[in-house]
Amino acid sequence: MKLRDFFTADAVNLNLQSDSKDDLLKELVSLLKLDDKSESILFKTLKRRENLGSTGIGKGIAIPHCRSLVANRLRLAYGRKPRGVDFNAIDGQPVHHFFLIVAPPLEVSNQYLPVLGKIAQFAKDPEVPGRLLEIDTPAQFLALLDSKAG
């Protein structure tokens, strides 16, 4: 399983506009190109997950994730906010990089947790946060995943 295989260029936004946690989650959800009702349901589910504890894992990275009936398969998106946003990360620092993971409640392939773990491992590479800030195109993001995430 390669992390790169779960991302598509159209689900990558290197210039997120939102300045609040809620708006940022909505902007990330919009990358999945769902209908309005599904987007609303997914946002509410992610917000409930965030209320349990922030998915900001530190070093400028957050991995908002949930299971939802609006997803018929594992879906991922990446967003970057160069200026950062307060996401209640565990280190108290602004978050610049957002990896969204959404999976159906019953997932035959059972890849949700392994993918979550792979993203966390990728994000902990000391070079990755800096490299993520330097990329200019979704293709460069996908190439970085290929080279660093296996």
Image: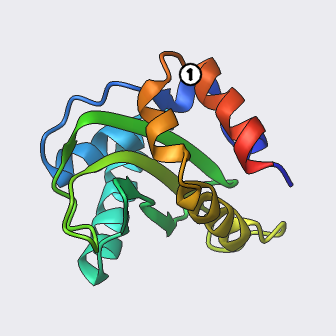
Q: Is residue 35 visible?
A: no
> Depth check: 53 or 108 in front?
53
Task: Assign the N terminus to one quadrant of the image.
Answer: bottom right
In the image, is residue 122 above or below residue 39? Answer: below
Horizontal side, residue 77 vs residue 104: left or right:
left
Q: Residues within 10 Å of mark 1 (few under 14, many from 20)?
A: some
Image location (x, y in percent) of residue 139: 64, 19
Residue at position x 31%, y 38% in the image: 27
Q: Is residue 75 left or right of residue 81?
A: right
Closest to the observer, 17 or 73 = 17
Give the mark count. Answer: 1
Q: Which amino acid type is shown beneath numbered disc 1? A: Pro
Q: Is residue 135 visible?
A: yes
In this figure, which residue is indicated by the disc labeled 1?
Answer: 138
Q: Is residue 91 left or right of residue 63?
A: left
Q: Taking 37 as reference, is 48 above or below it?
A: below
Residue 7 lies, in percent from the top left, at 66, 38
Residue at the location (61% across, 62% down)?
103
The structure residue drawn at horizontal position 33% and vertical position 24%, both measured from the top left corner, is 15
The spot of residue 78 in percent (x, y) is: 49, 40
**Where in the figure is residue 28, as x and y percent of width and height?**
38, 42
Q: Depth check: 39 or 82 in front?
A: 82
Among the 4 quarters of the image, the one containing residue 31? top left
The local secondary structure at tag 1 comes to: helix
